[in-house]
Amino acid sequence: MASVTRRPLMAGNWKMNCNHLEANLLVQKLAASLTEKQLTDVETVVLPPFTDLRTVQTAVDGDKLLIGYGAQDLSPHASGAYTGEISGSMLAKLGCTYVVIGHSERRAYHHEDDALVNAKVQAALTSGLTPILCVGEGLDVREQGTHVAHCSEQLDGALKGLTAEQVEKVVVAYEPVWAIGTGKTATPEDAQEVCGAVRQRLAESFGQDTADKVRVLYGGSVKSSNVAAIMAQPDVDGALVGGASLDAEEFAKICRFPEHISR
Ligand SMILES: O=C(CO)COP(=O)(O)O
């Protein structure tokens, strides 16, 4: 177990922020704030709104930036009469490698359930995209103490019908809803408790080898001041960062976390 190495992943979820001009500036500034070695050691990814993706692609390709990018959602369908939707193949064609699926904001505001999340995970994999599958409990569940069972259920629902080979390609993000955008970070021990339970559940369902390969991220008020303690946890392989990813220097500092930690 201890010998398993997973490349750390820092993913910036911009949510509904930045027009395409601002996106260009942010991605260029981010790349300029990190050395090639830092970008090699820690996989750095931005997740802008759909309307920014072409601009980010142009910046990344044009300047050969070592930054990955992806979308915040996709349609479960391949193509057709689904007004307003974006397919996985459209995202892949734009050079996206990642897509966020099942974010708590989509579960809450767009009533996405585990069955839809499962269909989206399958659609992403079919298009060659890496899903960043979000799970996490609200404050009520946390107060009842059933957060581990809640996240395990969300995980089971999202990965239903997948093979171990497919699951190896998935990134899981544990984002406690009560810690998102609130400034309340889960303690490093809280993050480890659920990230460890996620890996345990993956091992039970898909085998230890698969569980050891899957990267599990923590998300919720991650900042440069708390990232090192969170990343010191054995089952936390990276962070899904909201607000702090909109500031290039702050997100770059988050990506430079290995300077403050010995794992
Ligand atoms: O929801 C998040 C990332 O997907 C976390 O957002 P914040 O970092 O703003 O709390």
Image (spheres, helix red, strand yellow):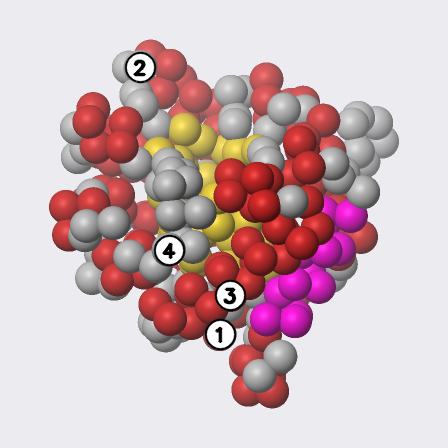
| Residue matched to label 4 | 234
Q: Is residue 250 left or right of residue 245?
A: left
Residue type at the position of mark 2: Lys
- Report if residue 71 is visible in the image: no
Q: Which of 52 and 165 is in front in this view?
A: 165
| Residue matched to label 2 | 64
Residue type at the position of mark 3: Val
- Asked if residue 60 is positioned above or below residue 101 in the image, the reply reads above
Q: Which of 57 and 261 is in front in this view?
A: 261
Ranked by sequence position, the earlier of labels 3 and 4 is 3
Q: Callout 4: 10 Å neighbours few (<14), some, many (20+)?
A: few
User: Under tag 2, what secondary structure?
Assistant: loop
Q: What stretch is highlighted in magenta?
A: 148-160
- Asked if residue 117 is positioned above or below residue 64 in the image, the reply reads below
Ligand 1: give its quadrant: bottom left
Q: Nearer the viewer, residue 263 or 151?
A: 263
Residue type at the position of mark 1: Trp
Residue type at the position of mark 4: Pro
Mark 2 vs 4: CB contact within 8 A = no
Identify the residue shown where x is 42% and y is 65%: 191
| Residue matched to label 3 | 194
Q: Main secondary structure of the magenta part?
A: helix
Is residue 152 rendered magenta in the image? yes
Ranked by sequence position, the earlier of labels 4 and 1 is 1
Residue 148 screen position, x and y as percent: 59, 71
Ranked by sequence position, the earlier of labels 2 and 3 is 2
Which label sits on residue 178? Answer: 1
**Label 3 to label 4: alpha-carbon separation:** 12 Å
